[in-house]
Amino acid sequence: MTEETPGFEEKPDVPSGATPDDAEPQAAASEEGAAPAGDANENAGLVAQLDQVRTALNERTADLQRLQAEYQNYRRRVERDRVAVKEVAVANLLSELLPVLDDIGRARDHGELVGGFKSVAESLEAVIAKMGLQQFGKEGEPFDPTIHEALMHSYAPDVTETTCVAILQPGYRIGERTIRPARVAVAEPQPGAQPGKPAEESTEAQADSTENAANGGGTADAEDAGNAGNAGNAGSAGNKESGGPEEG
């Protein structure tokens, strides 16, 4: 065992030629040099954390924008489907009422739509008009196979294209949706007729041709009779000259 000498105190090593008071400023300077290095490391860590937070924020913002766009598309799709389902339901209902409307139209054409029946019919027509049902199909309009259904066919000299000449059953539509085409009788231009020539002119031309043919035929008959008479006279004269017998 070693014995410590009482009153002995350890002192920091002091370089040779330096006093103990010079050691304290050197220690403080070393501590000040170490402090800036620690602050720089701490700032670098904070910048890295800030970059991570910004990256996460951008990702969450993009996710939120994507979800918002998907929700808007979903709302538009649901609204479109709702309108389509409503239109189909209304079209199915009104399709069942078309025979009733046809009966009302026939009764109106025959003058039988009177009294209370007339009031009920007008109320029904007002309701279906409010629901968007529209009637189409008129005589004289060009034939359109997308909205017309031809049930009868004929030729006419006074038309220049395929035309609806009679409406057998009117058509009905809801907006741009056709729920029943108009059933019509159509007429096409007569083969060989001049397009756009009125029927009266054609009739007059036929009458003139008939009259001319009749006049020409009569003149030919008269000429034939005259020629026959002249031939008979010539034959009689020949017989007299030849001394043949004369008929009494």
Image (spheres, helix red, strand yellow):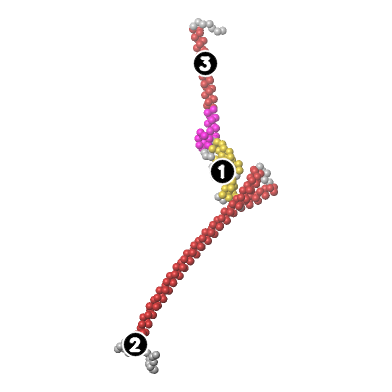
Q: In this view, does 112 lie to the left or right of 15?
A: right
Give the class, few, some or many, for how many residues have Cα within 10 Å of label 1's Cα (few <14, many ≥20).
Answer: many
Tell me the kind of residue under disc 1: His
Q: Which of marks 1 and 3 is nearer the N terminus?
A: 1
Above or below residue 8? Residue 206 is: above
How many residues crowd mark 3 within 10 Å: few (<14), some (14–19), many (20+)? few
Considering every residue shown, the one lying at the far right of the view is 116
Q: In this view, does 46 lie to the left or right of 96?
A: left
Res. 198 visible in picture: no
Q: Could you say where residue 72 lies in the image, as x and y percent from the top left?
A: 52, 60
Please report whichever mark, 2 or 1, sits nearer to the chain's N-terminal start.
Answer: 2
Separation of residues labelled 2 and 1 (CA atoms): 117 Å
In the image, 4 versus 148, the foreground residue is: 4
Q: Circle 2 sits on which residue?
A: 13
The x, y position of residue 59, in whole percent, is 47, 66
Q: Looking at the picture, which amino acid does disc 3 mark?
A: Ala
Is label 1 in contact with label 3 (beta carbons under 8 Å)? Answer: no
Q: Quadrant of the N terminus?
A: bottom left
Which residue position holds label 1? 148
| Secondary structure at numbered mark 3 | helix
**Residue to which mark 3 is pinned:** 228
| Numbered disc in front, either 2 or 1 | 2
What is the span of residues highlighted in magenta in the rendered image? 189-210
